Each structure stands twice: as structure tokens, then as C-alpha cells.
Amino acid sequence: DGGITQSPKYLFRKEGQNVTLSCEQNLNHDAMYWYRQDPGQGLRLIYYSQIVNDFQKGDIAEGYSVSREKKESFPLTVTSAQKNPTAFYLCASSINAAEAGVEQYFGPGTRLTVT
Amino acid sequence: AQSVAQPEDQVNVAEGNPLTVKCTYSVSGNPYLFWYVQYPNRGLQFLLKYITGDNLVKGSYGFEAEFNKSQTSFHLKKPSALVSDSALYFCAVRVFTGGGNKLTFGTGTQLKVEL
């Protein structure tokens, strides 16, 4: 099966702990993205990566970190500095980030709950 | 700033009736517009996109969208709604940042199709 996998589906953490969300794709896409979804707010971009070993901040990067050491993988770490981390996190990829008309493909998401 | 707006939080329609989910955009330059659908606790699925050419774009599952430049709109339509179409629908616009292409999403419209 080709696609994007995110694990785990549900994740629970205590406040003050860092947590890493996994995102893997076997679509051979160059670009990968992380979004946060909150009710009534749509999707907001956290970080994106156009190519291995390169990434840029999105609109709400504070309190998050990423790495892109392999083309297939783009893990997101939610740090203790993120003030309101409870949300649904979506990973996406696209064939590249340079072409304007390419669509993004999404993983199934990870629901993070921090108490 | 480039953005999209979805003026309706929820749309209700009877099965078999036509449906419309509204989207308006604000961009500088040529718009690149997308529609996605999200089922509960799932990732987003790509439906269709407008890049250039015909104003009526056909997509997956019988959906289509009409691009109207004068009204800056990109409304999603389907001639005959199904109960299984009930989901959350997002409109998105491509934003070119110089660091690559990003998508900016609307806040979503919940579609409810009733028997």
C-alpha cells in the first residue's frame, strides 16, 4: 500500500513532557507538512519541509520542532513550551513544494491529549 | 494576505437534492484552489482543484466546483447528495512564500445529508 502513516492514532501525555509524533510516507514525495487541527479553526501549518535536511516554520511553529533526516520520515516533537498542545495533528506530503498546482496527501492523524 | 473563507459552518440538505458548499478567496495573482473532505477522526482526502482552464472542475465521488473570477468564488457542488457525503469540507488556496508552496485552509463546512 502506498500512502502516509501516522502513529500512534491516540496519544496521551502529562503536561511538561515532550512527545514525538511519527509520520512516514512511501509515496516518494519530496515535500512534507505538519498541520494542527482545532475545532472551528480549520488546519494551521506548523512546519514544512521541501527536501531532506531542510525545513521551514509555518504559521504556528512556536513550541514545536521537526527533523527531516530521511525522505520518508518527518517526525514532529511537541515540546513542553507549547502552551496548548491538545489537538488533532495531521501530516501531509506532496510530490514537491515548487509547483503551485500539486495537491497534498494526508495521513490519518494523531489525536494528542495532554493533561 | 491570501486567504479563503467558508461562510457557512454547516449545510443541511436532503438526500437526492443538489448541494452547494461555498468558498470565496482572496489572492494576489492567479488563484490555485483546492477542495478536501474529512470524515470523522480521519485525515483529509483530496477532491478536486482549479489551476487554469475550464471554470467547471470535476473531481472525485461526483463532486464538481465552479470557479468564478468575478465573484472570487470556488463553490463545491454535487447534483444529487448522498447520506455518505456527510462530512467536513475544506477549501484551500495555494500561497507561494518564496520558500515553497503552502496551502491556507478555510475553517471548514460541516455537510449533513439527511434521509
Image (cartoon, grey):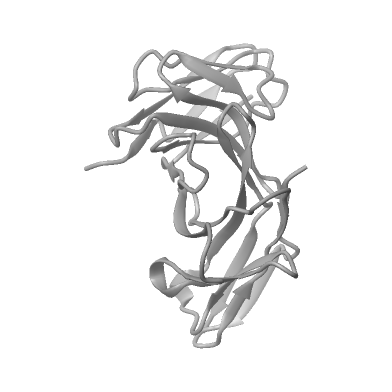
Quadrant in which residue A56 is drawn: top right
Task: Give the residue furthest to the left.
Answer: A1
Task: Give the residue furthest to the bottom.
Answer: B16
Q: Quadrant of the C terminus of chain A?
A: top right
Above or below, B46 against A76 in this view is: below
Numbered circles on residues, count: 0
Above or below, A94 against B52 in this view is: above
Residue B12, how many percent across, how many down? 64, 76
Q: Quadrant of the N terminus of chain A?
A: top left
User: Which residue is at a point 56% across and 12% down the rendered structure image?
Assistant: A18
Direction from residue B50 to residue A44 in the image, left or right: right
Direction from residue A68 to residue B26 in the image, left or right: right
Direction from residue B81 to residue A85 in the image, left or right: right
**In the foreground, B110 or B104:** B104
User: Which residue is at a point 62% across and 29% down the rendered structure image?
Assistant: B98
Direction from residue A75 to residue A65 in the image, left or right: right
Residue A96, how many percent across, how many down? 42, 35
User: Which residue is at a point 55% across and 80% down the rendered structure image?
Assistant: B114
**In the foreground, B104 or B69:** B69
Residue B84, how many percent across, how many down? 44, 71
Residue B103, how many percent across, how many down? 59, 42
